[in-house]
Image (spheres, rainbow, N blue to C red):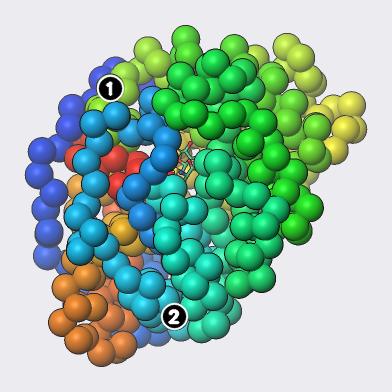
Amino acid sequence: MTTADTTLPILRSSVATDRTLAPMVRAPDGVRGVRLVDAHGRTIRDLRLSITDRCNFRCVYCMDPSARFAPSEALLSVADFARVARIACALGVRKIRLTGGEPTLHPRLTELIAAIARECPAEIALITNGSLATRSTLRRWRDAGLRRLTISIDSLRDDRFAAITRSQCKVATVLDAIEAAIAEGLTPVKVNAVLVRGVNDDEAPDLAGLARRYGIEVRFIEYMPLDSGHEWDASRWVSATQTRRMIETKYALRACDDDDASSTARLYEFADGVPGRVGFIAPLSAPFCGACSRLRLTADGMIRPCLFSQDEWDLRSLLRDGASDDAIAEFLTDAAWNKQAGHGVDSPDFHQPSRSMSAIGG
Ligand code: SAM
Ligand code: SF4
């Protein structure tokens, strides 16, 4: 990372008002039904399933208190998700991440994990706010086929945690969830944190300290213009470089030798040798689009090739209209082919998508 990555071309993003169901360019015959590749040479290995858009938190950087949800009848069923996962795996997907909204609110989560695990060779991971992840729920999900857990936490202070999440959940509940995930072997456990300037950026060293306390990876994700209230502006944004410097006031870091260039996170270890790592996910200051291997399915059945896509394509209608597996495979192949080269947030004419992170699946 360079010092230049502490400024952004956009100061405040305007919001795209319409979601277009743009026509898809057809993928070439050579890849149709064989594997998921895009027109820019990337292969899709990672499918993110947003299994619900509901959440029991209202994080300030994600979901406005007045956020509206898709009607229940619009949401995909367990069978739909499992079917899409199976077809995507046959096309080369190797990792399935369940997200949301808050995926642990899904009333049939155990069944859903089991259904995907039964049919897919992929690793199944889940990202959660940790509020409902106890030893017993985690054991149930692990026994159903869950393999890895990521837990989000943005403050270690109860009053601030309550203000950020606008929930009754306690910090101790989330820390217990981290310990429970480690104890249940859902490893490597990762922790995500988002810093918002003037809200919790002074906690960067303490949050990084969780990596040392538990011997895990704590990843700082740059605040992205994907909040449902559309209140993001550059003055609240904290770059990965600034975050690293704040952490280094307390802990000396050194870049990891085995840092994988295709990974989204730049990884550091503690110079004093204490186990644990700190990662920086810098979609705005150091975009990793060239290595992106993701495709996303929203809870209401839309395929989105990028978090920042203005385009999405309606898979739900195909699923409900009795399409064959081959037709769904073709649809996924075309959607992957249409993945944009980059998210475009660094462009001055960037528009925030009308869907928020929680409605896309982070
Ligand atoms: N509810 C779960 C959670 O919070 O972990 C899963 C869904 S949440 C949308 C997935 C991740 O997206 C979380 O780590 C959250 O902190 C992150 N996130 C949400 N809104 C964001 C934003 N505007 N910028 C950056 N990260 C965001
Ligand atoms: Fe809910 Fe996760 Fe968004 Fe927070 S970040 S409001 S927990 S979906």
Q: Amino acid at mark 2?
A: Arg
Ligand 2 is located in which of the four quadrants?
A: top left
- In the structure shown, which secondary structural element does the residue marked by tag 2 occupy? helix
Q: Position of residue 72 (x, y in %)?
A: 23, 59
The answer to whether the beta carbon of the residue marked 1 is less than 8 Å from any atom of ligand 1 is no
Viewer-nearest residue: 87 or 177:
177
Q: Looking at the image, which residue is at 28% across and 81% down?
A: 328
Viewer-nearest residue: 136 or 46:
136
Q: Looking at the image, which residue is at 29% across and 53% down?
A: 340
Query: How far, Cα to Cα, is label 2 from label 1?
Result: 38 Å
Circle 1 packing at 10 Å, graded few (<14), some (14-19), many (20+), is some
Number of marks drawn: 2
Q: Is residue 23 visible?
A: yes
- In the structure shown, which secondary structural element does the residue marked by tag 1 occupy? loop
Judged from this view, the residue extending furthest toward the right is: 273
**Above or below, comparing residue 160 to residue 323 in the picture:** above
Quadrant (top left/top right/bottom left/bottom right) for the N terminus: top right
Q: Based on the displayed image, in which of its 4 quarters is residue 74 positioned? A: bottom left
Q: Amino acid at mark 1?
A: Glu
Q: Position of residue 186 (x, y in %)?
A: 70, 57
**Above or below, comparing residue 262 to residue 216 in the picture:** below
Answer with mark 2 or mark 1, whichever residue precedes in sequence: 2
Position of 122 compared to 66: left or right? right
Q: Which mark is residue 86?
A: 2
Q: Position of residue 253 (x, y in %)?
A: 77, 26
Viewer-nearest residue: 309 or 214:
214
Q: Based on the displayed image, in which of its 4 quarters is residue 247 positioned? A: top right
